[in-house]
Amino acid sequence: MPNGTGSERMFSLEFTVEGMDFAAAGDVAGNLKRALQQIGLDPGTVRRACIVVYEAETNIVIHAYRGRITMEVSTEGISIVAEDQGPGIADVELAMREGYSTAPQHVREMGFGAGLGLPNIKRSADELDIQTKVGVGTKVRAFINIRRPESGGGS
Amino acid sequence: MSQYFHSVTLDKSLCKGCTNCIKHCPTEAIRVTGGKSHITEERCIDCGECIRTCANHAKSALVDGFERLSEFDYRIALPPPAFFGLWKPQSEIPVACARLLSLGFDEVFEVALAADVVAEAIRLLIEDDNHPRPYISSACPAVIRLMQVRFPSLLPNLIPLEAPIEIAAALAKEEAMARTGLPPDRIGAFFLSPCPAKVTAIKQPVGRSRSNLDAALSISEVYGAIARMPASKVKPITIRATPAGISWGGAGGEAKATRIKAAVSVDGIHSVTQVLDEIERGRIQDIQYIEAQACVGGCLGGCLVSQNPFISKVRLVAAAETYGAKQPAVQPVEVGRLLGDHRLSFDHRIEPRPVMKLDADLAKALAMMRDLEKTLETLPGLDCGACGCPSCRALAEDIVRGNALKTDCIFLLRQRVRELAEEMVDLARKVPPAMGQQTPEPAAGDTAGERAQETTGGGRDDSR
């Protein structure tokens, strides 16, 4: 469920994501895209943020039991935190490699688990931090700078 | 008023103010206010979904009338490929085309011929490795406008080629000038449009400053005029387009004509939206080309076409096989030359149209977005449309923009009324001591229950 809290100059959204809920995969990214377009960010920034969120939410759906995605938009950028309770990532470096995936066969048959999730996040985010503990869960933190071609956007 | 031209229009006298159209608009451009539908001009992409969903036929597509023929010395009719699918199997399509001349045209130029040209040009272009993948077809103007509003990040993926109608008109006028010696402004190019999006694309093009076409007639009006003509001998017209160019008019026709193997054909604006979403998320790696058409069935399903698109698809394919030319009218070498001379490309960039933006100032837009989400939490989330907005979220947006009130929501209004009524009953019970009040009111729950019953006959508080 969305949650519109945050400080003065910030807009934030928060959603919970359930593991294996493939029908809902993409909802969080869809909500974020709509909000960012209404905020009026440039198409490239919107797209990068949505890719990060989409991949983060599908990662939770595919691998975790449940998780929560928090997105905060300020005049500086978009901060995305995806925290899940799940198996964790045994080898982060390996997981960052394109094409590497631990997704089970039935998930791959649905067209997911191509091993592009984390690489896509890395490509799209300006900052990325992954903290994970095997058997506990994973916390992915990403930041996307707002590109402002025309000045005077702030204050 | 004059900033935007829209073919999609509303006849206020027919609009009952129902909320069918608002729900189907892909850009949430419609609101019902004052009992009538109202289209926000900057958001409308002329896809025609509202025309299709309006049971009262209050929405229609504005087209040019036949009287416009008199403005020119030489008049060219440009039937789209879909025109070939309108006729019953036994009809002689070359004869049907010839009857266009009886309507006052001097020449018939098939858009399908230009579809052959575009298909060949796409085959040549698709080899360019620097272009973002997948390529997205630029043939449907409603899809281009949808992308400008909702998928601006995908605009660079568009095939940088004009739609066949523009290329057809350019080629037709060139031929006519050579043949007649008339100046270009005396030659009129008339498109027989299957949809409002193409009418708008002619009146207010996105990829060029001025259209090569001069007017857009309704394809069904022209069809009707030909069908009503008494049988008479006419010299059949030689069809110059190939079966591939003719098939372009139906969904899947582009993919077939271009012979691109890894091509997705998607039709219907809502399905197109889903595929564009997938592309935007980087989920489509293996696809080279996206044929996207706003209408179900492709141009055969345009809202100015009265035939059923699924039936006319079969007829289109049959007509293509029967009447299509064996060889393309414009040879591949010539297509390459036209492409090299930039004769087939847009003359300006297709820019995003950020019409959803809440405010030009980022900080202010952020604050408004916060208000929007807060407002949305107070709304019932039923998306009933009774407020005249397509969804609770759209109402929240309108409230934040200052275009609507919270009490436009009938559920919130009802709640307010109930609260007021409860307060009134409460106050009515507060009898002054001089009028006989004996003991102060008990705080127990039984009277509260009584009260709720009196006021609303069991409200939602009781359900706990």
Image: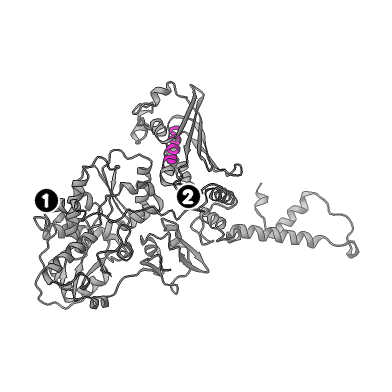
The residue labelled by disc 1 is: B333
Spot occupied by residue B255 in the image (x, y as percentages of width and height) = 22, 49
B52 left or right, relative to B435: left
Image point 43% across, 63% down: which residue? B41
Residue A109's tag is none
Query: Residue B251 lies in magenta, yes or no?
Result: no
Q: Closest to the observer: B42 or B60?
A: B42
| Image vertical order of residue A71 relative to residue B356, above or below | above
As measured in the structure, the alpha-carbon distance from the residue carrying label 2 to the one carrying label 1 is: 45 Å
Q: How many marks?
A: 2
Mark 1: few, some, or many residues within 10 Å (few <14, many ≥20)? few
The residue labelled by disc 2 is: A40
Give the colour scheme shown: one colour
Q: Disc 2 is attached to a residue of which chain? A: A
Spot occupied by residue B409 in the image (x, y as percentages of width and height) = 58, 59
> At numbered mark 1, what does the secondary structure look like: helix, strand or loop?
helix
Q: Closest to the observer: B160 or B136?
A: B160
> At numbered mark 2, what does the secondary structure look like: helix, strand or loop?
loop
Image point 37% across, 43% down: which residue? B280
Spot occupied by residue B257 in the image (x, y as percentages of width and height) = 18, 51
Image point 74% across, 59% down: which residue? B423
Q: Main secondary structure of the magenta part?
A: helix
B26 left or right, relative to B84: right
Q: Which residues are magenta?
A: A47-61
